[in-house]
Image: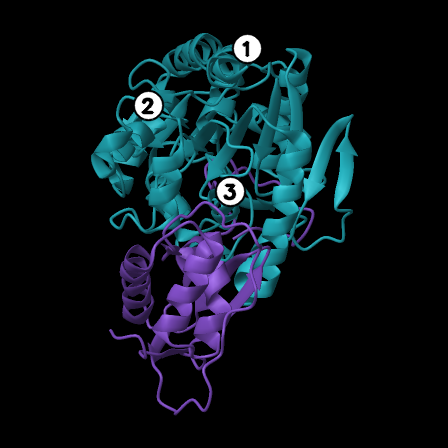
Chain colours: A cyan, B purple
């Protein structure tokens, strides 16, 4: 069964998407699927035809062609994809939104037509109201759509009701952690936040909350891992709130270091303003047996079970966030229990094998029908 | 429209290219992208040359298995669509000679009505790059451009 796995970025780019794709493809190949990757080189100088651990990789400059405003470049990329489809004769195309290169799928799908599986890992933004948008056409053209949370699925059904009946949730899954969880430490209490430093992540809210928390737990400190455009504002706020001795802006952390970083946490805070589609940080925290305090937005309530594996607070309410943190720091046994429950639930609900089984079943269903 | 009706490509706003028998067009003022089927691809050189409707009908009837009435009706629908999208406009300059269609294959091909498909949100989609902020939100360094926004 031949699957054309179409993704905007892939190895050797390093990021959450890229790492997931590499792990996913490796595992699906072991399950007997014959996979070919179609991706973009991004800004790197990479060969057009390559191999990742024996999996063929084809790279085409999708975004450059689309951004150029040059129809000749677009037509050139289309020609390349048509040639690939003729050579590969895929039984299934697996696409991901909101990758603009889906445009090229839409204009070449008549060549060796086959079922399309479309995966959504974001709350859909963009033009869904007009049938003539790439997003709408992509959704219409897909035989099946997966979302990584019920929140995304609900949003999809509300905005495009015709997708009901050909869509389902496949939660993100994580491979078993390499690092075993360490016991929760309370001396000092340590709050960990991970993510890009952008306003939507709400890290400023966590700083306001920390100022409140330290009145009751003066030794509390905070580690913020990540970087981004909001860093100067966060630095100013840290100074303004007098938190300079308590907050460490650690910068970027390599993927393999993330579990060890989470092991430094007494609890992990996910204070997002925007509707996170899933909340992978919360799942990683649970995997390391860390209780999570998270905003009640998007898919986070699916990952963090309020009162069992963590505490949810209302978006933007840093006073409630502070109370939730204090509640857990006041009661270490409760925090430990939440962390352990989170770890158990992570294994039960978000296991890697379940993730693969669900995709494998869809691959079989749609590509298998064709064979 | 009558047999002498002519249009011209709105060249200030539109970039277009025929490749592999199909046209790719971009309306640079709206950011909308267009692709066509092969029948529109066959017509496009005539449109670019400000050919009259009669020449386009003749081309379709000589190359495809279609009669003149059907061809004229489909052409009018296509040209109205392209005009509404500001891809073409009524020809302003006089045309000294009527361009004729290049000779097509001897055997007439199966006919499909000439169409273009429009994609309106490409600029928005490109602005969403990089995608998938949820799974990309772990602070892993990208190999290409350093810190993510």
The picture quadrant where one finds residue B57 is bottom left
The residue at which mark 3 appears reads as: A105
Asked which secondary structure carries label 2, the reply is loop
The Cα atoms of the two marked residues, 1 and 3, are separated by 29 Å
Q: Same chain, marks 2 and 1?
A: yes
Q: Chain of mark 3?
A: A
Q: Position of residue A51 (x, y in %)?
A: 77, 33
Quarter assignment of residue A233: bottom left
**Nearer the observer, disc 2 or disc 3?**
3
Residue matched to label 2: A166
Specify the quadrant that holds the N terminus of chain A.
Answer: top right
Crowd class of label 3 (few under 14; some 14 to 19; many from 20; radius 10 Å)? many
Disc 1 crowd, CA 10 A, few/some/many (<14, 14-19, 20+): some
Judging from the image, what secondary structure is the residue with disc 3 in? helix
Which residue: 62% across, 53% down?
Answer: A77
Image quadrant assignment for residue A54? top right
Work out how far the residue at label 2 is from the one at label 1, CA to CA, in angstroms.
Answer: 23 Å
Answer yes or no: is residue A49 visible. Answer: yes
Report whether A79 appears left or right of A117: right
Q: Badge 1 sits on which subunit?
A: A
Give the x, y percent position of residue A44: 72, 53
Same-chain check, marks 1 and 3: yes
The residue positioned 53% from the left and 53% from the top of the image is A228
B148, above or below A331, in the image = below
- Of all residues, the one furthest to the front in this rendering is B106
Above or below residue A56? Residue A204 is: below
Q: Earlier in the sequence, mark 2 or mark 3?
A: 3
User: Which residue occupies 45% across, 66% down?
Assistant: B26
Q: Pointer 1: what residue? A: A353
Quarter of the figure with the C terminus of chain A: top right
The answer, for residue A351, to whether it is visible in the render is no
């Amino acid at each position: 069964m031949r699957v054309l796995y179409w993704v905007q970025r892939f190895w050797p780019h390093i990021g959450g998407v890229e790492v997931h794709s590499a792990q996913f493809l490796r595992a699906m190949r072991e399950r007997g699927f014959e996979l070919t990757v179609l991706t973009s080189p991004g800004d790197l100088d990479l060969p057009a035809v390559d191999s990742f651990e024996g999996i063929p990789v084809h790279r085409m400059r999708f975004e450059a062609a689309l951004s150029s405003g040059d129809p000749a470049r677009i037509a050139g990329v289309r020609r390349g994809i048509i040639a690939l489809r003729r050579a590969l004769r895929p039984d299934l195309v697996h696409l991901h939104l909101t990758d603009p290169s889906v445009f090229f799928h839409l204009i070449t799908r008549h060549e060796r037509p086959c079922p399309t599986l479309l995966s959504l890992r974001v709350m859909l933004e963009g033009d869904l109201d007009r049938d003539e948008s790439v997003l709408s056409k992509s959704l219409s053209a897909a035989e099946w759509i997966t979302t990584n949370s019920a929140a995304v699925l609900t949003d999809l059904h509300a905005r495009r009701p015709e997708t009901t009946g050909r869509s389902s949730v496949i939660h993100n899954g994580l491979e078993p952690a390499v690092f075993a969880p360490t016991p929760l430490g309370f001396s000092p209490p340590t709050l960990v936040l991970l993510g890009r430093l952008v306003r939507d992540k709400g890290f400023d809210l966590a700083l306001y909350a920390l100022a409140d928390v330290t009145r009751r737990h003066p030794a509390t400190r905070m580690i913020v891992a990540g970087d981004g455009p909001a860093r100067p504002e966060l630095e100013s706020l840290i100074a303004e709130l007098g938190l300079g001795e308590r907050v460490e802006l650690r910068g970027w952390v390599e993927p393999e270091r993330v579990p060890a970083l989470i092991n430094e946490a007494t609890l992990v805070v996910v204070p997002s303003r925007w509707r996170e589609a899933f909340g992978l940080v919360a799942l990683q925290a649970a995997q390391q047996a860390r209780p999570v305090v998270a905003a009640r937005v998007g898919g986070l309530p699916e990952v963090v079970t309020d009162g069992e594996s963590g505490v949810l607070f209302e978006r933007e309410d840093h006073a409630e966030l502070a109370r939730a943190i204090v509640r857990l720091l006041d009661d270490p046994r409760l925090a430990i229990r939440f962390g352990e429950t989170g770890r158990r639930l992570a294994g039960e609900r978000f296991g890697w094998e379940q993730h693969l089984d669900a995709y494998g079943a869809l691959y079989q269903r749609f590509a298998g029908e064709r064979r | 429209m009558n047999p002498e009706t002519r249009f011209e490509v709105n060249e200030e706003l539109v970039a277009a290219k025929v490749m592999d028998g199909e046209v790719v067009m971009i309306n640079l003022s709206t950011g909308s992208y267009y692709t066509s089927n092969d029948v529109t691809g066959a017509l496009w050189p005539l449109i670019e040359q400000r050919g009259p409707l009669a020449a386009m009908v003749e081309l379709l009837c000589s190359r495809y298995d279609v009669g003149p009435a059907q061809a004229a009706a489909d052409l009018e629908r296509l040209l109205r669509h392209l005009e509404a999208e500001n891809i073409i406009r009524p020809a302003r300059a006089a045309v000294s000679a009527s361009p004729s269609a290049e000779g097509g294959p001897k055997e007439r091909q199966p006919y499909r009505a000439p169409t273009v498909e429009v994609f309106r949100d490409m600029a928005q989609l490109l602005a969403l790059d990089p995608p998938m902020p949820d799974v990309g939100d772990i602070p892993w360094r990208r190999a290409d451009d350093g810190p993510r926004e």
